[in-house]
Amino acid sequence: MNSNRKFLILISISILFIIWGGTQSGKKFQLGSARIISNLQKPLTSTASILDARRENQMLREKLIKISMEREQFQSYVKENKRLTQLLSFKEKSSYLLLCAEVVGISPYPNEGIILINKGRIDGVKKDMICITPHGLLGIVTDVAKDVSYIQTLNNPGFRVSAMDSRTRAVGIIRQKNGLILDNIPIASSINLGDTVITSGLGGVFPKGLFVGVIKDIKKSQDMLFYVARVKAFAPSLVEYVFIITQELPEEVPVSIPTPKEKIKRPIISEKPAIEPIIPEPKIRERMRKP
């Protein structure tokens, strides 16, 4: 009953509004109401537009960040591919049998000069094997575990290697003394700034001819009997990949190809047996004797 009354009341109010809307005052009321509603909708619409713009802006920022990350990752892949290509080229052109390894650990003390690589006993690494980079000598294997090895680099205070000036062949000792130096160079040698230092091969541990560095400064020792040259190493102190020399490849001996011998032409032998010519016996003239 109550619901019917409410329904009738609403119908009555609607009829009254329709009738009143046809009058002049009703039209003015409708126009004013529309203006009020329009003015009220404007801030709501602008607020919704601002919220939509903010959402769109946030989405664009996220897309931009994602694209930037993908670009950085792509550039990183390109650099890594270029670096690995150079390493592969160096390995193929080297006169040594090389094992490539990745540096997985660095000593926290810069002057200690110890690095850790991800190759060990199961990979064929042995103590006293030489570690190099495409730039030159880096160090020597000092300790080997199952799957890792420790490398003593040129920066280690205990590192020693016999080296020489590649131009004058003057021999000295490479070691650390507030930097890399070539010590005990004979005073009679004529070394110069800019000369290249290579391993001498003396001692039998380091092979001859590995690049070490370039001479940057030359001084005389305190006893004035030797030269002491300061050397800038070719191999960088921080590297990602290194090579372990596992074996020196033998020099290729040119194979002599035997030239084919000339065939001796055999005389053509007739199938029929040769008939010896009959040589007529010389006629003997009878001497006519007179009676």
Image (cartoon, rainbow, N blue to C red):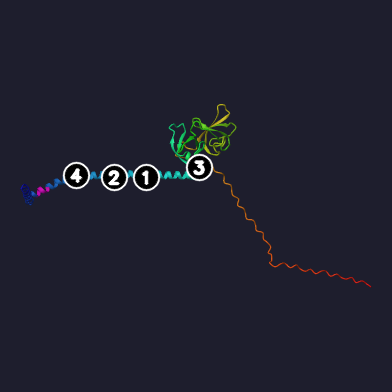
- N-terminal of the pair, mark 2 or mark 4, is 4
- For marks 2 and 4, give the CA distance: 23 Å
Residue 45 percent location from the top left of the image? 20, 45
- Residue 130 highlighted magenta (yes or no): no
Q: Quadrant of the C terminus?
A: bottom right
Amino acid at dot 1 = Arg
- For residue 59, which numbered disc appears in the image? 2
Give the number of the mark in front: 2 or 3. Answer: 3
Residue underneath mark 1: 71
Residue 36 percent location from the top left of the image? 14, 45
Residue at coordinates 45% horizontally, 44% vertically from top-left?
84
Secondary structure under tag 1 reads helix
Q: Which range is magenta?
A: 27-31
Residue underneath mark 4: 44
Q: Residue furthest top?
A: 223
Residue 218, relative to residue 80: is it above or below? Answer: above
Residue 196 is at least partly visible in this image: no
